Image (cartoon, coloured by chain):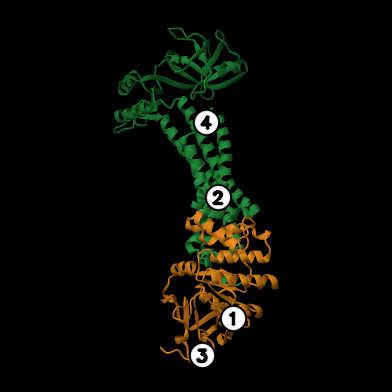
Chain colours: A orange, B green
Amino acid sequence: MAPEPNEDDGRWQEAGDHATSETIPTDAIIRGTDVVKEYETGGQIVRALKGVDFGIAPADFVAVVGPSGSGKSTLLNLLGLLDVATSGDVRLRGRDVSTFTDRERTRKRKETIGFVFQSFYLIPTLTALENVEMPRMLDRTPTKTRQRARQLLERVGLGDRLDHYPDELSGGQKQRVAIARSLINDPDIVLADEPTGNLDRDTGDRILELFDELRRDENVAVVTVTHDDYVAEAADRVVTLIDGRIRETESRRANFEEGPDP
Amino acid sequence: MAMSWLRRVTGRFPSVVIARRNISRARTRSLLAAAAIMIGVVAIGAIGAGGAAFKESQLDRIQEQGATNVYVSPGFDKEDRYFDRTDLMRIDETVGGAGIVATESRSMEYRVRSNRQRSLSVTYLDDPRRLHEVAVGEIPANWRRSAVVSSEFAAEYDLEPGDRIVLAPETDEGETAEFRAYRVTAVLAETQAFGVDQVYLPIEATGDRRYGQVRITTESVEEAEAAAAALREEFNGRKDTLIVFELTSLVRLFKSIVNGINVFLAGLGSLSLLVAGVSIANTMLMSVTKRREEIGVLRAVGYSKVDILRILLVEATLLGAIGAAIGIALALLVVLAANAIFLGSPFAFTSGSILYLVGAVAFGIGTSLVAGAYPAWRAANERPVEALRG
């Protein structure tokens, strides 16, 4: 199929627009076509996503921006296999997600996706090291898990905080622990919901730098939902969601490709 | 080295590690829930096992008091309301080697002083030594006239061998009692046994050699049952010529009564476990509500519903196990004391009491498991999207 010329690189399109799925890369880890998501709240059906197309390629850094209630979190939940679309086609490595059972979805989520939250959600009774190990605690491979967790914490610069509990860490340190946790299962995509929302600017900058390093070193794609413009500026692509539709997709991939250390 | 070894062990049971951490997080709340289980376990264990010890001690006493005996009296269909020599010989033949003692009981008036009388029960028989031991004095080989009294009776009226007691057969209103003096020849030894009369007189003193009751003494409860069965078969085919009474039936009755009371009390104890179950359920519900987001994160990072369910059930069970462990330790102290009091040794555990103790622990832990089921199920089925919606 001949790719249609397009201003942006075409991975994020409003549904029904010209030039849709053909431009979504064939190597996409997860891709959606004409995805609709409806909720029922208080007897009313709310359409959170009104038909969007998306695709995440390895080592992508995508920022999803938009006013609150525009469907950002809904999109992130679909990408994270936490929720299923009402209609439309979502495929994880070519497999239709809607055919997965709850158990399969949980397993795929564990293998493919890492989560980073605005409020970190570390478990207060576990040390930094144990928090990182947490997603793999039930795997009965304690030695391997510990090795990897230690390595990840050193990678995010917390090699000297292994045995600290969350309340002994600063906000930035907590988010670093959370990022290390999101990487423990070697995911393909890390989904970050307002990762810098609770952090000051400097700390936020360092978290963003960390994301950049990680996707380069660990070959992991990062999708972040954010209100902050400066977070969006760091991304390869910025997708603007308004009222459940993609309004605008801005590509800055060149920035990244011309970066100091590809 | 030690650390990594410990890690390898705990790494095998990650749910236990996670559950233990969570329990220690809300220490007071966890302790209170465990305390509720503890009380229930103590109640069931102490009541049940203590009661079992009590039952055992009472059974021992009944055994001592002649559960090996069978008592026979004339039945409703017997023409004469007494046994004569011929009857005694038939009974003796039927029960084979067992020893038989025939007695006749009658009420008599005892003149304490010239102006004071009381009625008492007198047993006529051939030889009191076949039933009881003699403490003081002696019963002559040819015992025909003198009286033998129980130690209680002797103590009450300050009697000793050589003293005289004055007795008269009980009379109807208006008749004059014919008082007669008997010399006390012996005082019986003190005994716990049941059926000890106050005064014993030789059967010749009745004048007619008629017996109202026969006691058959055997070596064991089984022999007593066999003797009773043989008597019923021989004498009570079509007519009830004998009333056969053996203490074994009383033992059975006693056992069923005590067991009933014990089960009832232990049942009351398990009510307290029910309350404990409510407390555990409440604790777990609060805990999962507080940890809603955390459980959402667990689900997000790949814990399945079953994983969440297991972690929370382990947590509830651990709470119950802590309570049950403390509870069983306390119950054991109570049972040790009960054993010492009733059975003479603190370690004289009966199979019944061990069953109650084990049952109390099992019931305590089981209650926690059941109580934890609903909160765990609710938490496991919460959609992670909802839980994480900040």
Q: Are marks 2 and 4 in contact (CB under 8 Å)?
A: no
- The chain letter for the residue carrying disc 2 is B
Relative image position of residue B276 (x, y in whole percent):
58, 52
Task: Tell me the element at label 3.
Answer: loop
Task: Tell me the element at label 2.
Answer: helix
State which quadrant residue B119 falls in.
top right
* Circle 4 residue: B347
Relative image position of residue B270 (x, y in whole percent):
54, 48
Q: Are marks 2 and 3 in contact (CB under 8 Å)?
A: no
C-alpha separation, residue under disc 3 versus residue under disc 4: 90 Å
C-alpha separation, residue under disc 3 versus residue under disc 1: 18 Å
Relative image position of residue B117 (x, y in whole percent):
59, 20
> Do marks 2 and 4 share a subunit?
yes
Q: Quick one: label 1, few (<14), some, or many (20+) residues within 10 Å?
A: few
- Compared to residue B193, the image places residue A245 above or below, namely below
Q: Residue at x 50, y 82 (%)?
A: A54
C-alpha separation, residue under disc 2 versus residue under disc 4: 27 Å
Q: Earlier in the sequence, mark 2 or mark 4?
A: 2
Task: Tell me the element at label 1.
Answer: helix
Nearer the camera: disc 1 or disc 2? 1
Instruction: Tell me, for residue A255, which label it has, or none.
Output: 1
* Circle 3 residue: A6
- Compared to residue B107, the image places residue A33 above or below, namely below
Relative image position of residue A126 (x, y in whole percent):
60, 57
* Circle 2 residue: B320
Residue B306 visible within the image: yes
Instruction: Tell me, for residue A171, which label it has, or none.
Output: none
Q: Nearer the viewer, residue B365 or B178?
A: B365
Nearer the camera: disc 4 or disc 1? 1
Q: Nearer the viewer, residue A175 or B291?
A: A175
Q: Quick one: label 2, few (<14), some, or many (20+) residues within 10 Å?
A: many
